Amino acid sequence: MKTAFVNIDSLVTINAQGAHEKIGAAMRDVGEIRNGAIVFDDVIRWIGPSSEVDAYLDADTELVDCSGKTVMPGFVDSHTHMVFAGSRSHEFARRLAGATYAEIAAEGGGILTTMRAVRDADVESLLDVGDALLTSALNHGTTTAEIKSGYGLDTASELRLLEAIGELQRGHEARVLGTFLGAHAVPPEWKHDPEGYVNCVINDILPRVAEQGIATFCDVFVDAGFFTAEQGERVLRAGIAHGLRPKIHADEIALVGASQMAARVGAISADHLEHSTLAEITALRDAGVVCTLLPGTAYTLGLPFPDARTMIDNNAIVCLATDCNPGSSFSENMQLMLSLACMNMKMSIEEALVAATLHGARALNLAAHLGSLEVGKWADLVVYDVPSYKDVVYHFGVNHVWSVWVGGNEVV
């Protein structure tokens, strides 16, 4: 059965005429239709003004009056760590008192705090955490999310994290993609032999991850105090050999050649980029690597916000994501990320919307199916109880979602 939304005050299509990205000045065009209508079942069948919708209705089409509402594509959150165990609120309080993220990590905290909790957790408890956060994200308009492992840092724990992610893939209303992030940090048992841990990831853990078949991507944290560009490249090329598309945490703390390496290996995205200069941005742009920006992390850690303006003005593919994780960005709310991006990275509302939808899909290799409202794409859309898309950012700190649809089914 088909559904038709009619009398939509603000229908935001992010129409890219079939392209998988909108770059430069094109990001300021969100394809808004005033008093619009959209007809869909599992995919979108027609889009246009409400005055023309009757010709596309069947006798059993369900009509939904969206007067006073805004309809947009579902958010595609392409960088999260939603499956974990434990809490790091005590470390958050320490940072507020003056300790840095790097100092806490050097003391054995940070990622390693979560690692210890994850190693003690079973799949069910990991799944409970992920399910609660993913459900909240869905309630705030995220219809597709990527979720990383990376808090186990040994074979059994990494596979257990991915097993929980796989359960979400099979059982949750939101769409889920999994990423293997075994090279997230060096675990304590390898503290004096980081190279040995890199070899363990490549030779021991990666083959098991590939055999398990849940992860789509392989990620690595290349930065000061974590992994070198050379180590990261070895991990990502090993991932490619196992059929996993490369992603990378890059330029968050310092410039160590991460973005140039991402361009060299053909990563689908380079994420963070708080310290990227024009040289890094140019390398990523020229290689077609998505620049995934995580304003929640810069906000939480007090880092400089990524230079979104230089990226957009130089025609890089700019994406927004939450980085939802227990240590440096504990928020699953993409509406909040839009506000942070507009206020702190000088993005326009339109640019932020494109970055959070179409370019999120591009960062997951799903832009042929998701991220914009175009005929033939999957019917993943969100209705907001505001008369203009601008209100979603203007009236910040509250949830404007009225209903959420995934594959043509109402799920919120």
Image (cartoon, rainbow, N blue to C red):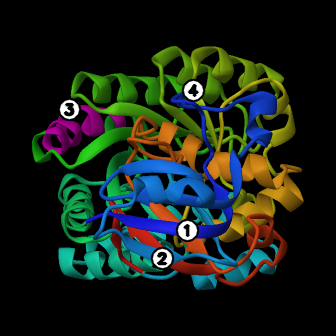
Residue in view at x 30 percent, y 30 percent: 239
Tell me, yes or no, whether the two marked residues, 1 and 4, touch with CB atoms within 8 Å. Answer: no
Marks 2 and 3: which is nearer the front? 2
Image disc number at residue 6: 1
Q: Secondary structure at mark 1?
A: strand
Choose between 279 and 185: the one closer to the eye: 279
Q: Nearer the viewer, residue 123 or 192?
A: 123
Report the Cα–Cα distance between label 2 and label 4.
39 Å
| Quadrant in the picture for residue 126 | bottom left
Where residue 104 sits: x, y (%)?
Answer: 63, 66
Q: Residue at x 67, y 21 (%)?
A: 285
The percent coordinates of residue 133 (x first, y second) are: 44, 77
Q: Amino acid at mark 1?
A: Val
Instruction: Pinpoint residue 36: horizontal percent, then vertical percent.
Output: 63, 59
Dot 2 alpha-carbon crowd within 10 angstroms: few under 14, some 14 to 19, many 20 or more: few
Q: CA distance from mark 2 to mark 3?
A: 54 Å
| Residue marked by disc 2 | 64
Residue 342 visible in the snapshot: yes
Residues under numbered marks 3 and 1 in contact, where contact means CB atoms less than 8 Å apart:
no
Q: Quadrant of the C terminus?
A: bottom left
Tell me if label 1 and label 2 are in contact, CB under 8 Å. yes
Identify the mark nearer the N-term, 3 or 1.
Answer: 1
Task: State the residue position of label 4.
Answer: 289
Residue type at the position of mark 2? Val
Q: Is residue 215 above or below residue 386?
A: above
Q: Which mark is residue 203?
A: 3
Is residue 407 highlighted in magenta? no
Q: Which residues are magenta?
A: 198-210
Foreground: disc 1 or disc 4: 1
Q: Give how far across and how far down residue 39 sits, in percent.
A: 43, 58
Cα separation, mark 4 vs mark 3, equals 27 Å
Dot 4 amino acid type:
Val
